[in-house]
Structure formats: structure tokens, C-alpha cells
Image: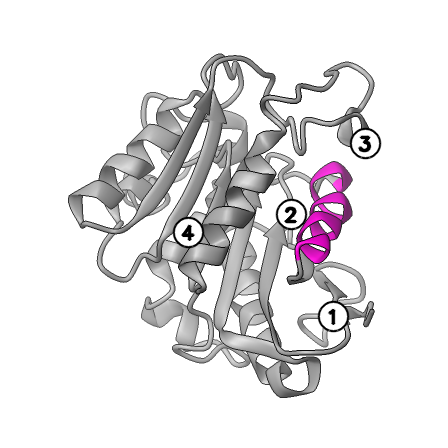
Amino acid sequence: MKHLSIKLWQENDIRPYLNTYILEGKVRPMVLICPGGGYSRTSEREAEPIAMQFNAAGYHAAVLHYSVPPSRHLQPLLDLSRAMCILREHAEEWKINKEKIAVCGFSAGGHLAASLGVHWQKPYLSKVKGISYPDNQPNALILCYPVITAGPNAHQGSFNNLLDHDASDELLHEMSLEHHIGKQTPPTFLWHTFDDKSVPVENSLLFAQGLRKYQIPFELHIYPHGPHGYSLATEETDPGNMGSDPHVATWMSLCIEWLRRVFA
């Protein structure tokens, strides 16, 4: 395995950085993972354990530790765009199928992944050195209990960390992603729990409704019970107060089955 830690921008000492989990052998699809953490941190429970699961299924994986405060919008989205470009720049060397790169995000990391899914064509991204269109384009999205809307069902803490407390209505609309889904948005796998008390299930439902409007293929799973931030829903990713749930844990096998169909 090629395990590298790569700085995204040379002027930065620590964050943001990309950890790779590149398998040996043949050319393979890639899953780029954006952990959650309310845009205040990146959760380790939604980082390497997720990469290991995709590796076990035969996918290359990478984890993006994107910018958090004091950095704010649009730096995390620039980070993700740059990470996508790095993967495609090294596609031949690392045996990545550059036409089969999925972005997988959890909670606020789901917002970041979905932001790229709806905004990757925006000029404000491609004007930045190190980001090129269409190299930053995701071929699929995997959204796990994602933050999506800045409207009535918003996770306010995530938007406070990303945009600060005095964000304009225009910026809130730009970051309320259900309004920006279009033909440029890739096929998407979503899952959520019905009784998520931190990020309401309406976030996933709104995104799914937007995908349906534009006839973009998606798969959506709503599990009846489970806390926010469940990660794999296994003992491995239990922080000590969530437990595990074999039913919710099926999301990973369902996701891999879906990804194989999308990338067939």
C-alpha cells in the first residue's frame, strides 16, 4: 500500500493535507473521504476506518483533512477541489481510474462533498492556481447523514463555523445545496437515520428530491434509529457512547454494491 501524507498548498505547514491509501496492482477506482466534525475539526472515526473498508472492497482511498477555523468558506471547497486535481495528476503513477473517483462525506464533510458535486464548475474554483476544470469533477457522491440545507432544518453550528455568524443571505443560499443541484451533479448514494437529532433527516430528503427533479440516479437509505455521527455503526467506530447496530452497518455493503454498479 502507498500511504502518503500530502500537503495541498505549499505555503501551509500542517492543514490541509491528504492521506492516501493506494493499493498495489491494477488500475482501480478511488474514493476520496471527507470526515465530519461540524467544520470545526475532522473526525478520526470517519477517516481511516472508512478508507480501510473501501480498500477491503478493492478501491483506492484517500482522506482529506480540510481547512477548519480560523479558515472559512470557501477554503474547504478549494481544498477538496485541489485534492481531486492531485489524484488525477497522479492517476497514472498511482493506478487510479481517473474517470471513477467518488467523494464520500460525513455530516459537515457530506456538505463539503455535496458542495463539490453542485459547484465544481464554478469559475471561482477554476481561477485558483492548482485547480483545473474538469479535473476537480467528482464522478459519484456518497453522502452519509450530510449537512445540506441552510434553511429551517440546518445544522446551525456547521454553518457558523464555515461562514461565521453574520453570513449574507446570498452566501447562505449558495451554501444551501438543494438549490444548486443540476445536470452537473453526479449519481449519489445517501443514508441517514430517521431520528438523527443533530442533522435532521430532511437534509438527505431535500438533496434526493433535487436529484429526482433533474433525473440524476440516486440511492437513498433511511434507517429508523441511530445517533448522528454513527460512522460504520460498528464497535470499531463506537466512541464509547453510541454502541453499534448491525442493521445500520449494512450501509457500507449497500454503498459498495451501488458503487460497483455506477462504476461498471
Residue displayed at 56% across by 70% down: 82
Please determine whether, in this image, residue 193 is positioned above or below residue 149.
Answer: above
Q: Which residue is mark 2?
A: 68
For disc 1, the neighbor class at 10 Å (few under 14, some 14 to 19, many from 20) is some
Nearer to us in this view, 69 or 2: 2
Q: Which residue is mark 4?
A: 115
Residue displayed at 45% across by 16% down: 194
- Mark nearer the N terminus (4 vs 1): 1
Residue displayed at 43% across by 30% down: 221
| Kind of residue at disc 4 | Ser
**Residue 7 badge:** 1
- Mark nearer the N terminus (1 vs 2): 1
- Mark nearer the N terminus (2 vs 3): 2
* Secondary structure of the residue carrying numbered label 1: strand
Residue segment shown in magenta: 44-57
Residue displayed at 55% across by 50% down: 104
